[in-house]
Image: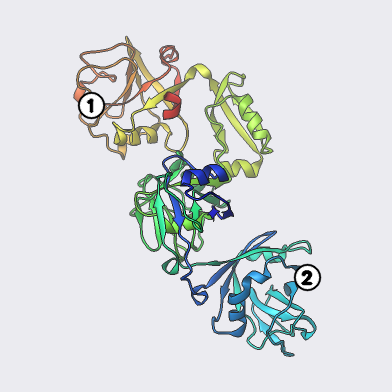
Amino acid sequence: MLVNGEKLSLPDGATVQTAIDTAEAPYKIGASVGILKKSESVRSESVREYRVKTTKGELRLEIIDHLSASARRWMEGFKQYEGISLRWGSKDATAFGPFSESLKPERNSTKLDKYDVLFSAGGYNPSNFHLLFSLAEHSADYGAPVDGPFARVVGGKKLLTSFERSDRILEIEPVIEWQESAKHLVTDDTSTTLEDGDGLFTFIKVKLALESPEGAEFFFGLIKDGLFKVDDESSSFISDNSLKGEICSFENFEARKDGAVWVRTAGYGTGKVFISRDERAASVVHSVIGHIEQGIELIHMAGRDHSIFVKTNPAPINILGIGFKEAEKHLEGLGIELVREGYKEDDSNIVKLNPSSTIDILLAKKVIATGAPDSLVIRVELYDDLAPKTLDFFRHAVGLTFRPIGTLPVMMIYEDTYLFKAAKSAEKYKEILPENVLVDKTKAFEIGITNQAAKRMGIVGVKTEDDDLFGPTGEKFSSTNIIGKILEPEKFKALTEKDTMYVLESNKEEIE
């Protein structure tokens, strides 16, 4: 049995949960897992690509002509080339071997294109064959069979010039076309029983593109609960539409290969994030923000309404909302210098970063962190189940869509009423329709937003006492949407009109 590509021995009747626990596999409760059933039905002729895992990384080879003798020999016996080491290299080619072959070497010059792959017999000796990779367009006598190159390198090309004598081929496996592959099952039921030969996939790992620092932050915002939720699917992609309507800068123009992660940056569907299931040309409205590094099988198995657990490389630098000492300890392990700014004491909470993106911080090896007194950082609970559309406005206005902490300047305080106005006027382009409006009374420390039924839409308010007549913003009940509550009332009551409240969203686990 395989769990995320690693071999594992399990007893008969083992469940998905047993496999996850035994393998210590990455998994989040509620996420969907993919189970690939063993199949003997895939013909070698149907396989176009092979993964060649080396000590330096992974190459991908594409077969040129399935009918050639060299290609058929490769497809029949590719496993025998596992374990061979780098034998020699030049400016034109690099070769792994030696090994014996039944192919006949020819004493002729072979014309090669860059990234061609062929069998090469040193001294025209069938017991001294090598697997040769062409590094440049050239012609040479390599003792190759008459049919010449049988494959080309289509992935991991940069590895070819980095190999050293200590490097070797670790594993070779076919890349199965899904229409030819085995049956599969996707489920979030971890009590599902596994069978011998099953392959279990519990997560995907996305390698983020250094060229897309803003796109990476957009992706972090999309998966802040750890899940990529499949809202749409086709033979070409799956997509998560959670941030549809949000703007993301275009940064990276490149072809969208199988496993590419990309965001639409303009036009209909702006903000939707896609993961490719095939190859597509580059587009000026689709910015590539990363690539699947592990778990591509799960991308091909998942369907609408499935949720996929995601890990990223690099992981996000999450130091907003924590103290300087804790942040310094975390960043020290990453080799990053932290410079304190604003309120610099140890009891401070970090509320702003420069640069603001994980990738830019990692590249700079330095970040300027602005601190605020703990008294101004206030935890809140937000009612996503009751007011999802109003919270979309609120998070956008205060900066919580992509960050765990938002800013909300105090506008006015009178009697028991505190009013706030976000610096970002999101009400100009986002609706605030009546949703979860007040019915009987205002509860102390619940957070309200004036909806479109009143002129002062977008105003945020909180009352420190129950009120039977008016909502938290001073409006009538029907004009007030309730979106959450203050979890630290004593800190809240100490706010003054010159303050900015830093809103720290608490997750359900913290609240419970």
- Does residue 407 appear anywhere in the picture? yes
Residue holding disc 2: 87
Q: Quadrant of the C terminus?
A: top left
Based on the displayed image, in which of its 4 quarters is residue 95 positioned? bottom right
Q: Residue furthest top?
A: 415
* Dot 1 crowding, Cα within 10 Å, few <14, some 14–19, many 20+: many
Q: CA distance from mark 1 to mark 2?
A: 74 Å
The secondary structure type at the circle numbered 1 is loop
The vertical placement of 55 against 41, above or below, is: above
The secondary structure type at the circle numbered 2 is strand
Query: Residue 362 versus residue 171: which sits nearer the camera?
Result: 171
Residue at (42%, 37%) from the top-left corner? 401
Q: Earlier in the sequence, mark 1 or mark 2?
A: 2
Query: Residue 131 versus residue 264: which sits nearer the camera?
Result: 131
The location of residue 20, given as percent across then percent down, is 52, 44
Mark 2: amino acid: Arg
Q: Quadrant of the N terminus?
A: bottom right
Based on the displayed image, in which of its 4 quarters is residue 140 positioned? bottom right
The location of residue 410, given as percent across then percent down, is 40, 20
Residue holding disc 1: 437
Q: Nearer the viewer, mark 1 or mark 2?
A: 2
The vertical placement of 403 against 475, above or below, is: below
Q: Is residue 377 left or right of residue 419?
A: right
Residue at (74%, 85%) from the top-left corner? 141
